[in-house]
Image (tube, rainbow, N blue to C red):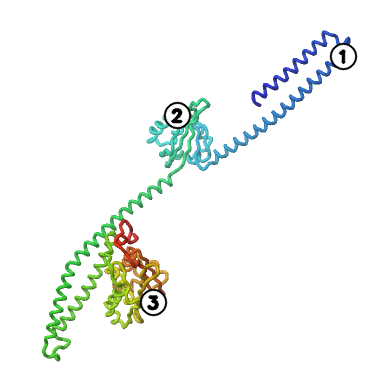
């Protein structure tokens, strides 16, 4: 019951009391039996006073019921907040300004490995390792002035001596006069988080080491490729001169019957041919490593110019025809038009076609290899290389463009190769802002489809700051 209502009730009772006293004194002085009318008047006055007391009693009863209900609600809320405090997912502690614990919930007790009742009255500093107590007390003494500390990380010690990483959030409690009277503590075990952060830091360090290793590897590939290519070009040049000399000597033989398979010049010519062929193969591998190194270092640029892509396709097919003829394979061009003008890098388009045709012929033992070239409605060019070879298993298709990955190591090892060809092809196609896809079935053949812009200009071709090949 608030003060104003209490004062009203007291005033009302006092008024009735004074009125009754006045009535009593009047009756006593006048003599009640000498004036019957006065008796009636007194009774009426008493009845009115009684009614006023009954009204006041009813108001008092209602106020008392409201007060009981309010006390019950307060008790329920107090219990609810007590339950929230006791069963909160984090540790909660209430202490005085010196850090002596006044209240603690179950999680706080569990974190410190002690029963709740034994926590009360103990300084929180007892649960801090001695090596950190001095710094703990310095911050504790400053809390009444700084009001709040968020995510204060320190090492805490359980009752059994074990330590754990804790994050503390502390707030100062004030009375109505804004004077500090206590502290509220939220204690959270962050051991798992600290371990995860340490593991993440270790992984990041390892990633940096791997990146450095990858950089050194790419630098080594580039350096060794350049070192190998220089003497190899000299070997190939002199081998070609020797082959021409031997061919001239063989042509000058007067008696054709004397030129048998055992003639030294013919034997020498065959040896030189093998040296030249294997040297060209080795040079192609070195060029492939160089392209891979440039792509990884994002230094490969496209030199665009106008050319006839149909003519380029026919040239590449003729260059690879001897390889197809050696396996009795049919190789043909299927062009929708006799001439299709494009603006692109003819050297890189040739490289794509040579790689795809070489793979198609390499893994096809019978049947045919077909190259299709045509225009698409949205100013794009489509190139498709189809073969009737051994095909690729469905589970292997997602990996065929990964560097150093080969479908069947036993098969590809007999055929040769670095496992970089298709990865380089995809990277060049993406550099041209195109796309590449593969459709294949085991023992039925493979189709590689490439779409590239018909008009690719220099600003669009020289792309920097993008990852050309995925890091694996």
Q: Who comes first in sequence, dot 3 or dot 2?
A: 2
Mark 3 lies on a secondary structure that is strand
Find residue 219 and report its horizontal and vertical position in percent: 24, 59
In this view, 333 is above or below 19 = below
According to the picture, the residue beneath numbered tag 3 turns out to be: 445
Can you see residue 396? no
Quadrant where the N terminus lies?
top right
- The mark closer to the camera, 1 or 3, is 1
Quadrant where the C terminus lies?
bottom left
Quadrant of the rendered structure where residue 232 is?
bottom left
> Nearest the camera: 209 or 130?
209
Give the Cα separation between the discs numbered 2 and 1: 77 Å
Give the Cα separation between the discs numbered 3 and 2: 80 Å
Extreme residue toward the top, this view: 29
Mark 3 crowd level (few <14, some 14–19, many ≥20, 10 Å Cα): many
In this view, 387 is above or below 467 = below
> Nearest the camera: 369 or 213?
369
Find residue 150 and report its horizontal and vertical position in percent: 44, 37
The disc at residue 144 is 2
Callout 1 touching callout 3 (CB < 8 Å): no
Find residue 394 and report its horizontal and vertical position in percent: 42, 71
The disc at residue 37 is 1
- The mark closer to the camera, 3 or 2, is 3
Q: Who comes first in sequence, dot 2 or dot 1?
A: 1
Give the Cα separation between the discs numbered 1 and 3: 131 Å
Quadrant of the rendered structure where residue 380 is?
bottom left
- The mark closer to the camera, 2 or 1, is 1
Find residue 98 and report its horizontal and vertical position in percent: 46, 29
Mark 2 crowd level (few <14, some 14–19, many ≥20, 10 Å Cα): some
| Residue depicted at x 87% and y 11% | 35
Mark 1 crowd level (few <14, some 14–19, many ≥20, 10 Å Cα): few
Q: Who comes first in sequence, dot 1 or dot 3?
A: 1
């Amino acid at each position: 019951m608030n003060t104003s209502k209490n004062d009203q009730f007291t005033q009302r009772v006092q008024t009735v009391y004074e009125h009754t006293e006045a009535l009593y004194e009047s009756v006593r002085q006048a003599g009640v039996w000498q004036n019957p009318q006065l008796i009636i008047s007194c009774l009426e006055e008493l009845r009115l006073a009684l009614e006023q007391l009954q009204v006041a009693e009813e108001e008092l009863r209602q106020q008392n019921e409201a007060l009981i209900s309010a006390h019950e609600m307060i008790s329920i809320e107090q219990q609810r907040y007590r339950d929230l405090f006791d069963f909160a997912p984090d540790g909660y502690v209430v202490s005085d300004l010196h850090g002596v614990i006044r209240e603690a919930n179950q999680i706080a007790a569990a974190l410190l490995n002690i029963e709740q009742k034994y926590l009360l009255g103990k300084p929180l500093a007892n649960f801090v390792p001695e090596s950190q107590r001095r710094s703990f007390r310095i911050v504790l003494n400053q809390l009444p002035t700084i009001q709040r500390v968020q995510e204060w990380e320190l090492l805490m010690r359980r009752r059994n001596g074990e330590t754990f990483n804790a994050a503390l959030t502390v707030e100062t409690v004030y009375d109505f006069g804004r004077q500090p009277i206590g502290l509220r503590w939220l204690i959270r075990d962050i051991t798992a988080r600290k371990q995860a952060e340490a593991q993440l830091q270790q992984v990041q360090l390892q990633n940096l080491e791997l990146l450095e290793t990858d950089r050194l590897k790419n630098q080594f590939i580039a350096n060794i490729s350049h070192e190998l290519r220089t003497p190899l070009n000299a070997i190939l040049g002199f081998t070609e001169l020797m082959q021409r000399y031997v061919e001239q000597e063989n042509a000058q033989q007067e008696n054709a019957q004397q030129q048998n398979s055992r003639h030294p010049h013919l034997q020498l010519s065959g040896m030189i041919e093998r040296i030249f062929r294997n040297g060209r193969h080795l040079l192609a591998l070195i060029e492939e490593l160089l392209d891979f190194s440039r792509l990884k270092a994002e230094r490969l640029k496209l030199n665009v110019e106008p050319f006839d892509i149909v003519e380029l396709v026919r040239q590449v097919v003729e260059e690879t025809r001897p390889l197809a003829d050696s396996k009795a394979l049919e190789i043909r061009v299927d062009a929708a038009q006799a001439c299709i003008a494009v603006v692109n890098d003819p050297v890189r388009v040739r490289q794509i076609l040579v790689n795809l045709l070489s793979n198609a012929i390499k893994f096809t033992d019978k049947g045919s290899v077909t190259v299709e070239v045509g225009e698409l409605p949205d100013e794009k060019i489509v190139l498709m290389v189809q073969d009737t070879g051994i095909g690729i298993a469905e589970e292997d298709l997602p990996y065929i463009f990964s560097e150093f990955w080969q479908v069947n190591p036993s098969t590809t090892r007999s055929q040769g190769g670095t496992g970089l060809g298709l990865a380089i092809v995809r990277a060049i196609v993406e550099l041209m802002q195109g796309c590449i896809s593969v459709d294949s079935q085991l023992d039925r053949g493979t189709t590689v489809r490439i779409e590239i812009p018909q008009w690719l200009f220099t600003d669009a071709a020289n792309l920097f700051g993008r990852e050309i090949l995925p890091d694996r």
